[in-house]
Amino acid sequence: MWKVYFNLTTPSPLEANLEINGMKVSVSQGSDQLVVELVEACDD
């Protein structure tokens, strides 16, 4: 599993969760980060 954090220019009051093609994109309320998380299982 890996996560990518993007710092946003301004904090977002929006809270959203979206899953597309095994990817989960979430923006936490009051957070200044956008988290992109791969939810597929990986063999390390």
Image: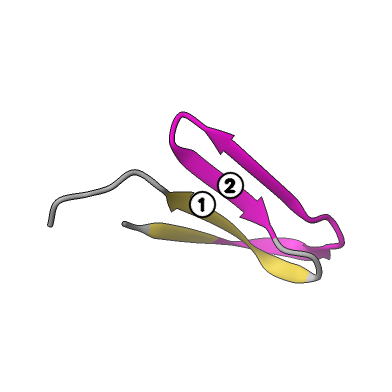
Task: Write the residue at 51% across / 52% down.
Answer: 36
- Amino acid, disc 2: Val
In the picture, the quarter occupied by the C terminus is bottom left
Please indicate whether residue 39 sits to the left or right of residue 41 in the image. Answer: right
Membership of 28 in magenta stretch: no
Secondary element at image label 2? strand
Task: Report how far apart the C-alphas of labels 1 and 2 lie in the structure.
Answer: 5 Å
Q: Residue 14, how many percent across, how many down?
A: 83, 55
Q: Which mark is residue 36?
A: 1
Dominant SS type (magenta): strand
**Residue in front for this viewpoint, 2 or 19:** 19
Q: Which residue is drawn at 41% across and 48% down?
A: 39
How dense is the environment of label 1, judged by Cα within 10 Å: few (below 14), some, or many (20 and up)?
some
The location of residue 32, given as percent across then percent down, is 71, 69
Give amino acid for label 1. Val
What number is the disc on residue 9? none
Q: Which colour scheme is used?
A: secondary structure
User: Going by the picture, which residue comes out furthest to the top?
Assistant: 21
**Does residue 30 sit above or below 34 in this rendering?**
below
Question: Helix or strand or loop: what does disc 1 sit on?
Answer: strand
Disc 1 to disc 2: CB gap under 8 Å: yes
**Magenta extent:** 6-27
Residue found at x 87% / y 61%: 13
- Farthest right residue? 13
Q: Establish if 24 lies above or below 2.
A: above
Among all residues in the image, which is located at the extreme left? 44
**Residue bearing mark 2:** 25
- In front: 8, or 29? 29
Residue 31, compared with residue 42, is above or below; it is: below
In the rendered image, the quadrant that contains the N terminus is bottom left
Where does residue 22 sit, x and y in percent of width and height? 43, 36
